[in-house]
Image (cartoon, rainbow, N blue to C red):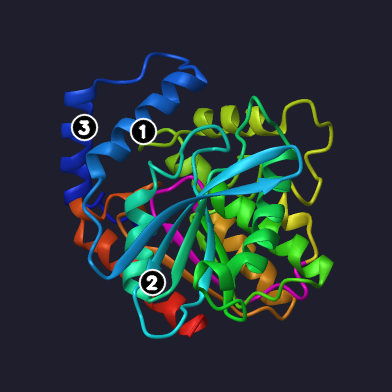
C-alpha cells in the first residue's frame, strides 16, 4: 500500500517551526524537550470562545496536589465531563501545551473537558502517573456536580502517553466499580513498550517522533520497574472486558499507528465497541496543530462530535 504524502499544511508548518526554533540538540534532556513543547504550545494558543467558561482548580490527593483546568460549555443544562490527560511521553507536556486541543474538544462537543496535570517521569516514574490518572478520574467523578457537570455522563481520554494513562484510569474505574464511564477517547495512544511494529519500521526514522524518542520516553516512564508486560505498562496485556466503548484516532505516518489500532482490535475481541479512525497524511501530534491543516481540524472536529454523542 502506498503511503499518503505528508499533509501540505503540516509540511509547511514543520519547515517554518524548525527554521524559527532550530532543531533540538542531540540526545536532548527532559528539560530541553519540555521547553520545546511549551514553546510550540504558546505558538498555538488562541483566545477562548465565549461559549466556554474556563477555570483552574487543584485536586487535593493523598501526598500530592494536581492542577486541573476545566473547559465547561456555557449551556442551560450541566454538560457531560471528559477527564483528559495530555501527551508528551509521560515526561513532557502540560495543561498549557494542550490548551488548544482541550478547548476545541469542549467547544465542538458541548462536553466539559477537565485537563489534568499529572506527575511526570523521570521524577515520578511508573506507577506514579498511572496512579495519578486513576485517582484524578475518581476524584473528578465525585466533584462533577460541584463543577457544574453531570456525574452520570463521564468519559476519559488523552493523546499519546495521555491515551495510555486514560486506559489505565478506565481499567481502574472498571475494577473499582465506583465510576461508570461511557467513552474512551484515545488519540494516537502509546500502547506497546516494545516499539517494534511495522509502523515503527516504516515511520520511526522520519517525522516529528522517532523510534529513538519513544524508546527514551518509555525508559523514563518505566524507570526501574522490571516487568514491561505489566498490564498498566502494556495495555494489550490487560483484560479489556467491561471497558467503555472507545473512539481511537491514529495517524497514518506515525510510529504509534499500529499499536493504537491493535488496541482497538483487542477491545473488539472482548466485545467492547471500538471505532478506529486512521487519518491520512498525518504524523504524531497533529491534533494540536489544527490551525495548520484542514485534515487535522476535521479529525479533531469529528472526535468532538463523537464525544458529544457519547456523553449526550
Sooner in the amino-acid sequence: mark 3 or mark 1: 3
Q: Residue at x 76, y 76 (%)?
A: 242
Q: Can the viewer see residue 302?
A: no
Q: Residue at x 25, y 55 (%)?
A: 290
Q: CA distance from mark 2 to mark 3?
A: 27 Å
Q: Which residue is mark 2?
A: 304
- State whether the magenta stretch is mostly helix, strand or loop: loop
In the rendered structure, the answer to whether residue 39 lies left or right of residue 27 reads left
Q: Position of residue 175 (x, y in %)?
A: 83, 66
Of the numbered discs in the image, which one, if any, rests on residue 38? 1
Q: Residue at x 17, y 50 (%)?
A: 9
Q: Can the viewer see residue 273?
A: yes
Q: Which residue is mark 3?
A: 17
Q: Classify mark 2: helix, strand or loop.
A: helix
In the rendered structure, the answer to whether residue 8 lies left or right of residue 282 reads left
Q: Classify mark 3: helix, strand or loop.
A: helix
Amino acid at each position: 500500500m502506498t503511503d499518503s504524502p505528508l499533509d501540505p499544511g503540516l509540511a509547511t508548518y514543520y519547515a517554518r517551526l524548525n527554521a524559527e526554533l532550530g532543531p533540538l540538540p542531540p540526545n536532548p534532556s527532559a528539560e530541553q524537550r519540555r521547553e520545546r513543547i511549551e514553546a510550540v504550545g504558546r505558538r498555538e494558543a488562541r483566545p477562548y470562545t465565549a461559549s466556554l467558561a474556563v477555570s483552574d482548580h487543584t485536586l487535593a490527593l493523598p501526598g500530592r496536589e494536581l492542577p486541573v483546568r476545566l473547559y465547561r460549555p456555557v449551556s442551560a443544562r450541566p454538560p457531560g465531563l471528559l477527564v483528559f490527560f495530555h501527551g508528551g511521553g509521560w515526561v513532557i507536556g502540560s495543561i498549557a501545551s494542550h490548551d488548544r486541543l482541550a478547548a476545541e474538544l469542549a467547544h465542538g462537543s458541548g462536553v466539559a473537558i477537565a485537563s489534568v496535570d499529572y506527575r511526570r517521569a523521570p521524577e515520578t516514574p511508573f506507577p506514579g502517573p498511572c496512579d495519578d490518572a486513576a485517582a484524578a478520574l475518581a476524584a473528578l467523578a465525585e466533584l462533577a456536580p460541584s463543577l457544574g457537570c453531570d456525574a452520570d455522563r463521564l468519559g476519559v481520554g488523552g493523546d499519546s502517553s495521555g491515551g495510555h494513562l486514560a486506559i489505565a484510569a478506565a481499567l481502574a474505574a472498571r475494577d473499582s466499580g465506583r465510576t461508570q464511564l461511557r467513552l474512551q477517547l484515545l488519540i494516537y495512544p502509546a500502547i506497546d513498550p516494545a516499539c517494534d511494529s511495522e509502523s515503527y519500521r516504516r515511520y520511526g526514522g522520519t517525522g516529528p517522533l522517532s523510534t529513538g524518542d519513544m524508546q527514551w520516553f518509555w525508559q523514563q516512564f518505566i524507570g526501574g520497574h522490571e516487568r514491561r508486560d505489566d498490564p498498566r505498562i502494556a495495555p494489550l496485556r490487560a483484560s479489556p472486558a467491561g471497558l467503555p466503548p472507545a473512539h481511537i484516532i491514529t495517524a497514518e505516518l506515525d510510529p504509534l499507528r499500529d499499536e493504537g489500532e491493535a488496541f482497538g482490535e483487542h477491545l473488539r475481541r472482548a466485545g467492547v465497541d471500538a471505532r478506529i479512525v486512521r487519518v491520512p497524511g498525518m504524523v504524531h501530534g497533529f491534533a494540536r496543530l489544527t490551525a495548520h491543516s484542514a485534515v487535522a481540524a476535521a479529525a479533531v472536529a469529528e472526535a468532538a462530535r463523537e464525544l458529544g454523542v457519547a456523553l449526550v
